[in-house]
Image: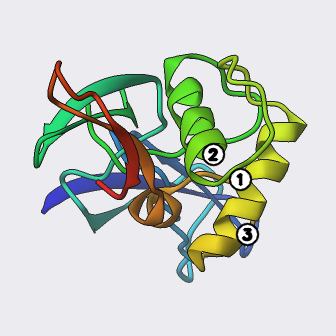
Amino acid sequence: MQKTTTRILAAAGTSALALTSFVGVTHATATAAPEQGDRIGQVRTVTAEVGAKAAGYCTTSKTFRKSGYVYTLPVDSNGNRGCTMSQGASGKHVTALQNALKFCYSQNIDVDGIWGPRTTAALKRAQKQMGVTADGVFGPKTYAKTKWRAIKDDPNNPVSSCRTY
């Protein structure tokens, strides 16, 4: 586990503003109620345990080989799978997801690397098939259940199929 330090700035009465520096963490929340005697501008420090290898936002794609198949999967800037992305994203990571949606979930979408409303709608339909929350956001739970286009790593027989990674 990696420790992350969060500074809580006490503001008038009961609210607080959390200022945190996270690297490779997709979501974190810190809250703290000011203690009696806190004044505006005072700083208290809270330390939280954070998973050391939590993936961040998807930024590109990477080719992986597993069990005789080649997969192209979305990854974060550190090459970690399990990353998050949503509408408005564009790039190779979106192309990898669109390929999975088109070929493994029979979604009628363009594979253009641009995530617009049609990709969101296609992902929601696929999420229902996967049995995960159909929110149109590609996060770690959806990533774990997604079937990817896998191409057999055999130049004489490059057959493709859909498999989880």
Seen at 77% across and 62% down, the residue is 125
> Would you say 161 lies left or right of 98 here?
left
> Would you say 164 lies left or right of 67 here?
right
Is residue 136 shown to the viewer in this render? no
Residue located farthest toward the front when viewing the structure as drawn: 156
Residue 134 is marked as 3
Task: Where is residue 160? Give x, y as percent.
Answer: 37, 38
Seen at 77% across and 39% down, the residue is 119
Residue under pointer 2: 101
Q: Can you tell which of label 1 and label 2 is closer to the viewer?
A: 2
Specify how the rendered protein is coloured: rainbow
Seen at 13% across and 44% down, the residue is 66
Q: Please state which amino acid type lies under the numbered disc 3.
A: Ala
> Would you say 1 lies left or right of 130 here?
left
Q: Please state which amino acid type lies under the numbered disc 1.
A: Leu
Is residue 41 shown to the viewer in this render? yes
Seen at 53% across and 80% down, the residue is 35
Residue under pointer 1: 123
Q: Can you tell which of label 3 and label 2 is closer to the viewer?
A: 2
Task: Where is residue 67? Give x, y as percent.
Answer: 10, 49
